Image (spheres, grey):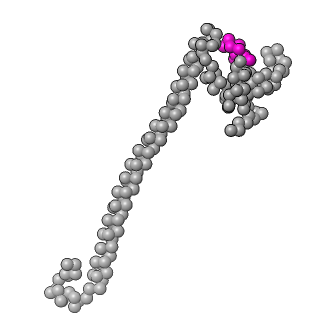
Amino acid sequence: MDILSTSDEQMVAIKPICDALGIDRKRQQDKIKEHPILSLVGGLSPLTGKDGKEYEMFCLPFKYVFGWLFTINPNNVDELARPNLIKFQEECYEALYRYFADKATFVEQKQLEIDKQLGVVEEAKGYFKNAKNVLFDAETKLQKLRKLTMDDFDFERRQLKLFN
């Protein structure tokens, strides 16, 4: 799997987040480096610190920060930060559920509509086949009528008994 981060991606330093959560930055950095996806996108990046100076900091692209936070065990964070992390993770579970459940609902509803439309198509084919038969019969009778002569009329005792 190749995951490439582009230079225009917003990078986020993990140290301030680790400090806010009361967890060890080095341990989190190691976990990121061991992760099969995060290891491909995490790394040192030049960022400006609070003091205005540029520092090399271990960072993740912004779009991966949420997934990383989802992997942190709330029992390992500072007691004051724990409720916020748990609330965040509950929202992640809800978002994941909605994303995949909505896809399943879409696929189910789409299949129901496809089945319904297939029924309409089959019914229309039946009508079409019947209409073709009616048309064929009508054209056959029309051809016979066009070929009908006065002698045929007289032979049938002056009645149009063409279609027995």
Q: Residue furthest left?
A: 157
Q: Residue furthest top?
A: 79
Which percent across, then down, holds residue 62?
A: 69, 27
Which percent across, then down, holds residue 84?
A: 59, 14
Does residue 27 show up magenta in the picture?
Answer: no
Which percent across, then down, holds residue 2?
A: 71, 38
Q: Residue furthest bottom?
A: 151
Q: Nearer the viewer, residue 5 or 144?
A: 5
Quadrant in which the N terminus appears: top right
Q: In this rendering, would 41 be left or right of 103?
A: right
Q: In this rendering, would 38 be left or right of 82?
A: right
Question: Image point 30% across, 73% down: which residue?
Answer: 137
The segment highlighted magenta reads 16-26
Give the number of callouts: 0
Q: In this rendering, would 130 be left or right of 5?
A: left
Does residue 19 show up magenta in the picture?
Answer: yes
Question: Image point 64% across, 21% down: which residue?
Answer: 69
Q: Nearer the viewer, residue 72 or 157?
A: 72
Quadrant in which the C terminus appears: bottom left
Q: Residue furthest right?
A: 53
Main SS type for the magenta part? helix
Residue 148 drawn above or below residue 82: below
Q: Quadrant of residue 96?
A: top right
Question: Image point 74% across, 24% down: which residue?
Answer: 59
Q: Quadrant of residue 91?
A: top right
Residue 92 drawn above or below residue 105: above
Which percent across, then down, holds residue 40?
A: 72, 32
Q: Visible in this render: residue 50?
A: yes
Q: Visible in this render: residue 61?
A: no
